[in-house]
Image (cartoon, grey):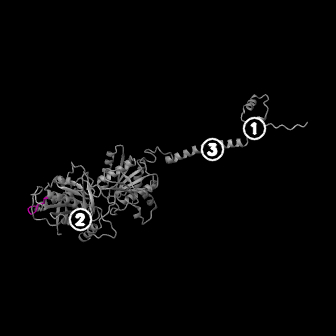
């Protein structure tokens, strides 16, 4: 496998330049064939395929070339063995020396510059039959759609790719899609009858959390019209950020809190919640992990962070649930092949017991699914239009070394989602339409499920002046009623028992003669149930 490295200088909008590195894998073939036009029917015809990939270079973010490049490389090796008449040239476009970047429109424009300028300079020697965009970042769909080229993504995206009027050529093999998370959150709200939720998005780590929760809020309000979803954003790098002040309004909004962002900021929010007595089981906190139990983005379970014991956080983590993909079995042989490529070709050395980026297998599936569709297209001499190729993916199951995967009618991979508590799977959702399924009992510190209505109501109307919880006041009132009833019953039974054992005793007033007092006479005559015993002394004659 040969490489050709080219440096492209792309002028940006501010008058400066951006430098991009272009790495080509497998030299382009020299056999020209017309592009996007059916060739003559020939079982041995070679289909020339150009794959363009926009990637990030530094191994710290999702979809970086260090992690996804080896998966692409291994897929091309396996494709050459399984489909010898598919000739694939893959070009990676990535930043040369920027270790940490947030992708913006300039990077997408750089790919367009490469496509229209650099690529076309060599079309006299070689022109592909099919161009496919295989992306591992959230960019490039506009260009592919305008060119009617197939667009494949293997990392979660925020656009609604199910809108086929807008994105007719877009197919996603991502381990989980935006739809997976949206449907899971909706299912939870319906399952537990939650109508009020609070969303916290941390914005300094990445623009993704805020964008994701904006989409989630819109989705919840559309799916459940009676629901209320309040979104808070914060930047933890701002010195004025006060986590206690962020958490205080939540008491009057909901007891169900969703969070997305950096794990360290989640811990700060939970610590502030503990100071406000909001980690005793009356509130439930959710975060989501697109990586499952991978530690690339941090960890969401205290069992991994207890090097320094913190009793406050240990207690707070009892109230945290994680929404994540259901863990699937991994092919150890494929894992070993990709790991070796990563270390040999990309210079990244894995730490002992380090988990692989879960997007690696989705990236491998991207090219393997593409190859199966293009081989079918080649054999049947079908159109290579991006719209037509995308339709061949839908409602179809693919079988690969990385596992089976199914693309639904919207162009997304269907995945099972899990809701975990301390790494234990509690609830599972299979697919986009099935309801939640409970698989284990959760050890929750309070009453479960937690209602979404605030403890003291939305205006504090459910609590007394001393802010005693309503259930405490109700318990106290009930106790007083029960105590009074008990005392009345006890006194009555004691009196009856005394009267029964002392039936022969008379009240002193009843032994008096009526005389001229009619009230005394009336009382004596009306005492019906008393037996009068008169002692008559013996008379001796």
Q: Residues within 10 Å of mark 2 (few under 14, many from 20)?
A: many
**How many dots with numbers?**
3
Secondary structure, mark 2, is helix
Q: Between marks 1 and 2, how big is the CA–CA gap?
A: 106 Å
Q: Which residues are magenta?
A: 123-129
Q: Residue at x 61, y 44 (%)?
A: 486
Is the stretch drawn in magenta largely helix, strand or loop? loop
- Residue under label 3: 487
Q: Is residue 485 left or right of residue 279?
A: right
Q: Is 63 situated above or below 257?
A: below
Determine whether, in the image, residue 217 is placed left or right of residue 449.
left
Mark closer to the chain start, 2 or 3: 2
Mark 1 and mark 3: Cα distance apart in space: 26 Å
Q: Which percent across, then down, holds residue 387?
A: 18, 52
Residue 69's label in the rendered image is 2
Task: Pinpoint residue 111: horizontal percent, then vertical percent.
Answer: 18, 59
Q: Which mark is residue 325?
A: none
Query: Quick one: 192 or 530, which is closer to the camera?
Result: 530
* Residue 128 shown in magenta: yes
Q: Residues within 10 Å of mark 1 (few under 14, many from 20)?
A: few
Indicate which disc, 1 or 3, sits on the residue closer to the N terminus: 3
The answer to whether 467 appears left or right of 338 in the picture is right
Element on which disc 1 rests: loop
């Amino acid at each position: 496998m040969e490489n050709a490295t080219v440096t492209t200088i792309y002028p940006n909008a501010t008058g400066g330049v951006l430098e991009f590195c272009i790495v080509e894998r497998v030299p382009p073939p020299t056999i020209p064939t017309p592009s996007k036009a059916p060739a003559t029917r020939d079982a041995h015809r070679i289909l020339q395929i150009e794959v363009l990939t926009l990637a990030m270079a530094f191994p710290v973010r999702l979809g970086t070339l260090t992690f996804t490049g080896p998966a692409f490389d291994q897929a091309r090796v396996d494709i050459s063995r399984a489909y010898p008449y598919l000739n694939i040239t893959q070009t990676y476009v990535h930043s040369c020396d920027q270790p940490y970047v947030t992708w913006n429109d300039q990077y997408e424009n750089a790919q367009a510059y490469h496509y229209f300028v650099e690529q076309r300079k060599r079309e006299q020697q070689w022109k592909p039959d099919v161009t496919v965009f295989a992306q591992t970042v959230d960019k490039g769909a506009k260009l592919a759609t305008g060119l009617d080229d197939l667009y494949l993504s293997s990392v979660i995206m925020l656009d609604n790719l199910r809108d086929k009027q807008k994105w007719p050529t877009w197919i996603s093999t991502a381990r989980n899609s935006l739809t997976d998370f949206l449907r899971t959150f909706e299912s939870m709200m319906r399952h537990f009858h939650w109508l009020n939720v609070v969303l916290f998005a941390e914005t300094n780590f990445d623009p993704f959390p805020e964008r994701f929760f904006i989409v989630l809020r819109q989705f919840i309000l559309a799916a459940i019209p009676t629901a209320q979803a309040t979104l808070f954003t914060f930047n933890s790098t701002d010195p004025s950020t006060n986590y206690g002040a962020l958490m205080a309004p939540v008491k009057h909004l909901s007891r169900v809190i969703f969070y997305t962002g950096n794990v360290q900021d989640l811990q700060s929010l939970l610590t502030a919640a503990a100071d406000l007595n909001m980690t005793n089981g009356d509130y439930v906190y959710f975060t989501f992990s697109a990586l499952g139990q991978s530690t690339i983005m941090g960890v969401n379970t205290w069992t991994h962070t207890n090097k320094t014991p913190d009793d406050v956080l240990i207690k707070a983590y009892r109230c945290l649930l994680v929404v994540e993909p259901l863990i699937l079995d991994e092919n150890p042989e494929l894992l070993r092949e990709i790991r070796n490529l990563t270390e040999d070709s990309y210079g990244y050395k894995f730490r002992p017991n380090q988990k692989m980026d879960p997007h690696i297998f989705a990236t491998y599936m991207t090219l393997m699914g593409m190859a199966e569709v293009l081989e079918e297209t080649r054999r049947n001499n079908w159109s290579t239009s991006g719209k037509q190729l995308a339709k061949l993916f839908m409602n179809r199951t693919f079988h690969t070394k990385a596992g089976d995967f199914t693309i639904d009618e919207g162009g997304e991979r269907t995945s099972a989602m899990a809701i975990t508590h301390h790494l234990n799977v509690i609830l599972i959702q299979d697919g986009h339409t099935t309801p939640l399924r409970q698989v284990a009992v959760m050890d929750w510190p309070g009453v479960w499920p937690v209602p979404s209505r605030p403890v003291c109501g939305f205006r504090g109307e459910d609590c007394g002046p001393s802010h005693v919880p309503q259930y405490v006041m109700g318990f106290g009132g009930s106790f007083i009623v029960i105590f009074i009833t008990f005392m009345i019953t006890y006194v009555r039974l004691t009196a009856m028992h005394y009267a029964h054992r002392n039936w022969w005793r008379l009240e002193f007033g009843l032994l008096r003669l009526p005389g001229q007092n009619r009230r005394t006479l009336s009382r004596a005559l009306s005492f019906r149930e008393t037996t009068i015993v008169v002692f008559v002394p013996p008379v001796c004659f």
